[in-house]
Amino acid sequence: MAEQILLAISSFPDVEIANRVAHTLVDEKLAACANIIPAVHSIYCWKGKVETAGEVIVFFKTTQDRQKALQDKLRSLHPYEVPEIVYLKIDRGLPDYLRWVAESCAK
């Protein structure tokens, strides 16, 4: 079961947007849960210029089966032109928790 679980990570401009998107993805069973981490400081290159910004990071727990739907919905709701959406494969974890993630994302 662990091979089916993914950690999706995305950054947002503020907590309100992150919260709204997280609620939608969990409500639509695209993510089992979302952890919102406020107040990160990001430094990045955008259109040839080094930028800095305060951002919010969100960790979404999802499944490989729901990955495309989560990505499509997240991209449609995200205010950034090119949103950060990256995935980490979860290869280990408490079996009960991994089962809960899979069940929570089931269609």
Image (cartoon, rainbow, N blue to C red):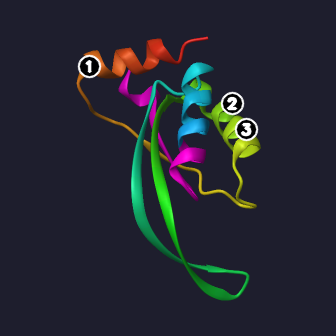
The residues tagged by marks 3 and 1 sit, at their Cα atoms, a distance apart of 28 Å
Residue 21 locus on image (x, y percent): 61, 38
Q: Quadrant of residue 14?
A: bottom right
Query: Is residue 48 toward the left or the right of residue 4 in the image?
Result: right
Q: Residue at x 58, y 20 (%)?
A: 27
| 27 vs 92: above or below | above
The residues tagged by marks 3 and 2 sit, at their Cα atoms, a distance apart of 5 Å
Check disc 1 and give the amino acid type: Pro
Contact, mark 3 vs mark 2 (Cβ under 8 Å): yes
Q: What residue did someone put label 2 on?
A: 69
Residue 92 locus on image (x, y percent): 28, 33
Check disc 2 and give the amino acid type: Ala
Instruction: Categorize mark 1 by other alpha carbons within 10 Å: few (<14), some (14-19), many (20+).
Output: few
Instruction: Categorize mark 3 by other alpha carbons within 10 Å: few (<14), some (14-19), many (20+).
Output: few
Residue 54 locus on image (x, y percent): 49, 68
Mark 1: secondary structure: helix
Q: Which mark is residue 95?
A: 1
Q: Which residues are magenta?
A: 1-18
Does the magenta segment cover residue 4?
A: yes
